[in-house]
Amino acid sequence: MSMNENPKISIIVPCYNVANYLPLCLASIIAQPIGKVEYLFVNDGSTDGTLSLLTDFCTDKSYCYLINQCNAGVSGARNAALEIARGEYIYLLDGDDILTDGAILAMLECIENSSVDIVLSEVTLLKNGVPKRIKLSMRVGEYTPDALYRSCCIFPTMPNLLYKRAIIETNHIRFNREIRLGEVYEFTVKVLAKSSKIKVTSDCFFYYVMRSSSATHKPNFLIDLTVIDTLKQYELHSNGLSRYTSFQVTAFKMLMSFTYNKYAKLGLCDKTTLSVVREFLYNPLVRKCITKVAYTPKVPIKERILALYVLLSGILGYKILSKVLRYICRI
């Protein structure tokens, strides 16, 4: 299958057992204009009908390319696509997500006659078919990485960015296959550390479909605690960006979403859960992150209050919160 000659954007779409969701993703791609873009689909060892759907879709489409491989995880799938990507910019889209109407035109407009290394867009969450727009905490404009982090922004950890491929290739940046949670932000941190200009736009390029089976909703204690290793990688590759409060705030929100908040919302208060929460709360690196968020005046008040509560109340505070949330869910 021949590929688009000179694509401006390479859209990487890893797919693993998403046959029930993929048709909506593919329909959103068909609705976009053809030209200046290539789609790199990776079937990552799916055991449902995903491969059949992708094969049928890519047939006779010169702008689509299909990689079929044994399961290597989402990071391995994205890395496989990066090896053959030829676009000036890279965009990540999961097989269960949906491009917004006019997404490609909006992307092209953002990078046209521009020398930015990263474009950061807004996100619309889609839960049970109901959309919810997530506004960025930083103003629209162009920033250096230092200026962006000095603004005390909360950097999104979702794949809502365009990355200049030259930055990725020149610095041999790839997704870390050892990271199970927060892999997109870890990748972004490495690109940010080598970038000089970031563009923030109020455009929204895709719908992030929230599924109950995703890692942010379903507990897996062994995997969930690997988020601490992700935090270590963030600091290791940040090239000094980790000194900024906004870096710590973003890390704090990521840490909480995969552990403390998730368990509390599920009302989990059994012995095993409490042991995991205790291990999380008293990890030195986690505690350092929470402390910085709790006691820095520039941090948004919502995050400061939560950080203070978590820091000062310990395991007792978790028990109280989980019981309150469980009671609220029953009302």
Image: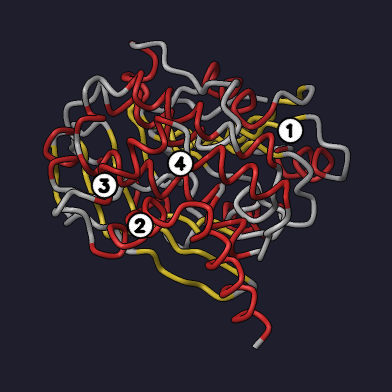
Pinpoint residue 5: horizontal percent, then vertical percent: 47, 25
Amino acid found under the numbered disc labelled 2 = Glu
- The reply to whether dot 4 and dot 1 touch (C-beta < 8 Å) is no
- Residue drawn 80% across and 30% down? 45
Amino acid found under the numbered disc labelled 3 = Cys
Q: Image check: 299 left or right of 207?
A: left
- The relative height of residue 28 versus residue 66 in the rendered view (above or below) is below
Q: Earlier in the sequence, mark 4 or mark 1?
A: 4
The quarter holding residue 145 reads top left
Mark 2 — residue? 122
Callout 3: SS: helix
Amino acid found under the numbered disc labelled 4 = Gly
For marks 4 and 1, give the one nearer the viewer. 1
Q: Earlier in the sequence, mark 3 or mark 4?
A: 4
- The reply to whether dot 2 and dot 3 touch (C-beta < 8 Å) is no
- The relative height of residue 252 versus residue 129 in the rendered view (above or below) is above
For marks 2 and 1, give the one nearer the viewer. 2
Mark 4 — residue? 35
Pinpoint residue 130: horizontal percent, then vertical percent: 56, 76
Pinpoint residue 324: horizontal percent, then vertical percent: 56, 75
Callout 1: SS: strand
Q: Image check: 321 left or right of 133?
A: right
Q: Alpha carbon of mark 4 to alpha carbon of mark 2: how far?
A: 24 Å
The quarter holding residue 287 reads top left
- The reply to whether dot 4 and dot 2 touch (C-beta < 8 Å) is no
- The relative height of residue 58 versus residue 1 in the rendered view (above or below) is below
Residue 110, which numbered label? Answer: 3
Q: Earlier in the sequence, mark 2 or mark 3?
A: 3
Q: Alpha carbon of mark 2 to alpha carbon of mark 1: how far?
A: 27 Å
Pinpoint residue 175: horizontal percent, then vertical percent: 51, 23
Callout 4: SS: loop
Q: Alpha carbon of mark 3 to alpha carbon of mark 4: how far?
A: 16 Å
